[in-house]
Image (spheres, rainbow, N blue to C red):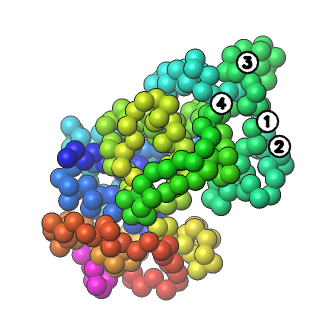
């Protein structure tokens, strides 16, 4: 069976323990399956992309011992901002089929129009459909008037279902918790939801391992796959790493950047050992390299199913990595 996976860091900040944990699982799963692993830099969110952050993300991954495949031995990778022409080509197809429409709402307008119970757990306000009466061809008038707009994808109504490799059957009513979503920004940049689908399709990615903060995105991306008559990959979402306050691990919880540990002389084996312990892959948190961890797993196919389904809490002040 084919296995093409990917590591897809965003260069919006340094890689931290939470990202590293997900990348480690993606790497182990792909290497065990003797698949190909691709590297993609997701830099479409340009205002937040920091200079040198791509190089930093690559250095961080290499430092903890993860590698990826290409024709040029760890040197080539895909950068989303180089692929805008391809994304535009697909967006044009969606426009021609009236599967997207121009939305002139501001973020605060969407938040005000969405009634309180329609607040999705992970994704902010649900779009109330204010502009959905427009056809995609209405953009010509907006252009003439110099009005800014984003492109929204018409989320098909009804109950959407898919199966996660760890969490099993997933289903959700589109109107209740999803709503139409943005696939193209007003400043001409393709939005994440569309870009990742096109990338994964174009590069033959058939296995996606990522954090479960993207579970809602999976419904949306499946809808795009369906609209384009492409096959979606097998999805596997890894529980998130939270701070002690139960919120997603972030800077305010303390510094868990890989580069910080590296500067402080912590070995990458300590990091991998700690992450393997937190994933219940090893009984203790003894230092180990990623390659030795892969060897220890061997041919055991059940390790992915045994991963904890609960979010894990990291307390950076108690992380004894030093
Ligand atoms: Zn709108």
In the image, residue 7 above or below residue 261 = above
Secondary structure under tag 1 reads: loop
In the image, residue 137 above or below residue 284 = above
In the rendered image, is residue 14 in sight?
no
First-in-chain label (1 vs 3): 1
- On residue 130, the disc is 1
Whole-percent x and y of residue 136?
Answer: 67, 21
136 falls in the magenta region: no
Whole-percent x and y of residue 295?
Answer: 16, 69
Whole-percent x and y of residue 173?
Answer: 61, 50
- On residue 295, the disc is none
In the image, residue 133 above or below residue 240 = above
Q: Work out whether residue 258 or residue 224 is closer to the camera in this orientation and state it.
A: 224
Q: Which mark is nearer the camera, 1 or 4?
A: 1
Residue under label 4: 151
Residue under label 2: 109
Say whether marks 1 and 2 touch (CB < 8 Å): yes
- Residue ID at (33%, 63%): 25
Residue under label 3: 138
First-in-chain label (1 vs 4): 1
- Does residue 30 appear to the left or right of 274 in the view shown? left
Quarter of the image with the C terminus in it: bottom left
In the rendered image, is residue 8 in sight?
yes
Say whether marks 2 and 4 touch (CB < 8 Å): no
The residues bearing labels 1 and 4 have C-alpha atoms spaced at a distance of 13 Å
The residues bearing labels 1 and 3 have C-alpha atoms spaced at a distance of 14 Å
The residues bearing labels 3 and 2 have C-alpha atoms spaced at a distance of 20 Å
Secondary structure under tag 4 reads: strand
The residues bearing labels 2 and 4 have C-alpha atoms spaced at a distance of 16 Å
């Amino acid at each position: 069976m084919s296995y093409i996976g990917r590591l897809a860091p965003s260069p919006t900040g340094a890689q931290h323990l939470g990202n590293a944990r997900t990348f480690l699982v993606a790497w182990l799963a792909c290497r065990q399956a003797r698949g190909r692993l691709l590297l993609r830099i997701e830099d479409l969110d340009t205002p937040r992309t920091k200079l040198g952050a791509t190089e930093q993300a690559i250095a961080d991954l290499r430092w903890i011992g993860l590698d990826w495949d290409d024709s040029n031995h760890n040197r080539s990778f895909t950068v989303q901002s180089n692929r805008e022409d391809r994304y535009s080509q697909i967006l044009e197809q969606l426009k021609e089929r009236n599967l997207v429409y121009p939305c002139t709402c501001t973020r605060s307008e969407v938040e005000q129009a969405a009634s309180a119970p329609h607040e999705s757990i992970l994704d902010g306000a649900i779009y109330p459909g204010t502009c959905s009466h427009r056809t995609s061809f209405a953009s010509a008038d907006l252009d003439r008037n110099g009005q800014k707009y984003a492109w929204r994808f018409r989320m098909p109504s009804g109950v959407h279902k898919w199966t996660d490799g760890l969490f099993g059957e997933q289903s959700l009513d589109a109107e209740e918790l999803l709503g139409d979503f943005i696939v193209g920004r007003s400043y001409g940049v393709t939005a994440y939801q569309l870009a990742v689908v096109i990338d994964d399709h174009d590069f033959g990615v058939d296995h996606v391992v990522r954090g479960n903060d993207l579970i809602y995105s999976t419904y949306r991306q499946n809808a795009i796959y369906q609209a384009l008559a492409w096959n979606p990959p097998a999805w596997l979402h890894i529980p998130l790493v939270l701070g002690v306050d139960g919120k997603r691990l972030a800077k305010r919880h303390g510094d868990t950047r890989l580069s910080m540990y590296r500067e402080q002389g912590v070995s990458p084996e300590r990091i991998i050992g700690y992450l393997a312990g937190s994933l219940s892959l090893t009984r203790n948190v003894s230092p180990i390299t990623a390659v030795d961890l892969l060897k220890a797993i061997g041919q055991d196919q059940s390790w992915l199913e045994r991963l904890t389904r609960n979010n894990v809490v990291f307390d950076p002040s108690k992380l004894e990595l030093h």
